[in-house]
Image: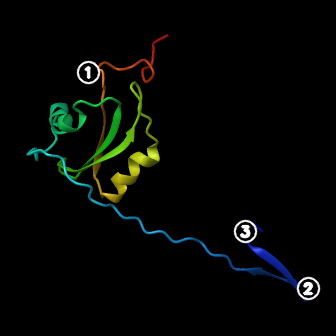
Amino acid sequence: MGNAVAKEMGGEQTTMPYRVTRYRLLMVKDGSIPTTWDRQVRQSKDVADLMAPLAANLDREHFWCVLLNGKNVVVGVNLVSVGSLTAALAHPREVFKPAILGNAAALLLVHSHPSGDPSPSTEGSISAP
């Protein structure tokens, strides 16, 4: 019967009720990015321009979720993960949570390369047979 406690009463089995925790989720503004950038995202350079102040001079990889509205205008940025020198792990739950709470119509996933080399690592690539 799981977490419920059963009692025998006169040949009849009854179940004691148990409580289920109720949650309330909140999204809290945590400052702002120092930029005058407020354009619609049309190309990857737009995202690079937006994220450059956040990704400058980092000693570890960082992974962000950039929230967009229905017109591809950035409405928020969430730091999902801070990793190591060569990797930043991100679970889908942590990526989609701010997107859902922020009512994003779309999202962009961004991560930094502390080495400054933007070429992909071998871990995420698929090799041809």
Q: Which residue is mark 3?
A: 3
Q: Is residue 43 left or right of residue 120?
A: left
**What percent of the width, then of the height, locates residue 113?**
31, 26
Q: Which residue is mark 2?
A: 11
Report the residue that reaches farthest toward the bottom.
Answer: 10
What residue type is disc 1 on? Gly
What residue type is disc 3 on? Asn
What residue type is disc 2 on? Gly
Q: Which residue is mark 1?
A: 116
Residue situated in front as seen by the camera: 78 or 42: 78
**What percent of the width, then of the height, locates residue 16?**
74, 80
Instruction: Report the label total.
Output: 3
Q: CA distance from mark 2 to mark 1?
A: 74 Å
Can you tell which mark lies on residue 70? Answer: none
What residue is at 42 percent from the left and 28 percent from the top?
A: 87
Of badges 1 and 3, nearer the viewer stands: 1
Q: CA distance from mark 1 to mark 3?
A: 53 Å
From the viewer's perspective, is residue 14 above or below residue 55? below
